[in-house]
Image (spheres, rainbow, N blue to C red):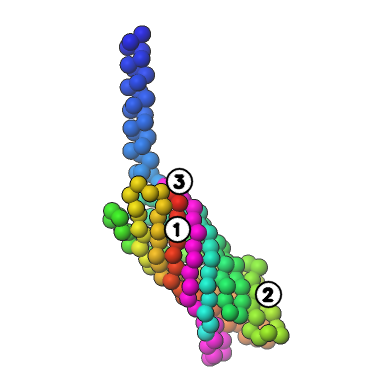
Amino acid sequence: MKIKSFGILTAASIMLTCGAANANLLFDIYAGGTYGIGGYTMFMDGEHISKSSQSYGAVLGMDIPMFRVELEYNYLDADAGNFNIGLINAYFKLPTPVVKPYIGVGIGSTFDSKYEPTTNTQINLDDTVVYQGMLGITLDLPVVPFNIDVEGRALYAPDIYEAADITPDLLQYEGRVKLRYVF
């Protein structure tokens, strides 16, 4: 009886210790929200139109020691339009203890978006391929299940719409804060 109890306690201790040790080595799942502020520029026929913009978003991802992969939704609220954007992002980060610099890229698409170059017209945008690049730092606070990302981001959408033989490109740039809850 005593040997059986001792064996069960030993097995349970080993499983709990190895499980906790391996959990941090494999990956962390996270979900979070983003807020960004910046501007955008429309490039069309040698003309540049620049306006201010804000973005709101949500992320769901997986954090591996040197890499991070996430799904991202962005709502870009610009002066002349509203853009819904879905992206898949990949990041490379340095494995430093608390402050972790990173660089990332993403690819995605716009959907259900509208652009209003003047008050009398509204253009429904087709699904357009979107590319983005990010550079930032993650504050990985010990004991707290939240990570804070501060990043600069540039988003590029070529030929975002076609009207009257005009196909402008969109370049959106912003500073962004991301709060991620690590499960």
Which mark identifies residue 179?
1
Q: Position of residue 26 (x, y in %)?
A: 38, 44
Q: Position of residue 174 (x, y in %)?
A: 46, 73
Query: How would you rate the neighbour count of disc 2 (Cα within 10 Å): few for under 14, some for 14-19, many for 20 or more?
Result: some
Q: Is residue 18 left or right of residue 174?
A: left
Could you say where residue 108 lies in the image, as x and y percent from the top left? 54, 65
Q: Residue furthest front?
A: 144
State yes or no: residue 160 in magenta. Answer: no
Queried whether the magenta region covers residue 43, the answer comes back as yes
Q: Is residue 131 above or below residue 9?
A: below
- Of the numbered discs 1 and 2, the one sitting upstream in the chain is 2
Camera-near label (3 vs 2) is 3
Point out the stretch of residues depicted in magenta: 28-49
The residue at 34%/53% (across/down) is 141
Q: Quadrant of residue 162?
A: bottom right
Residue identified by numbered label 3: 183
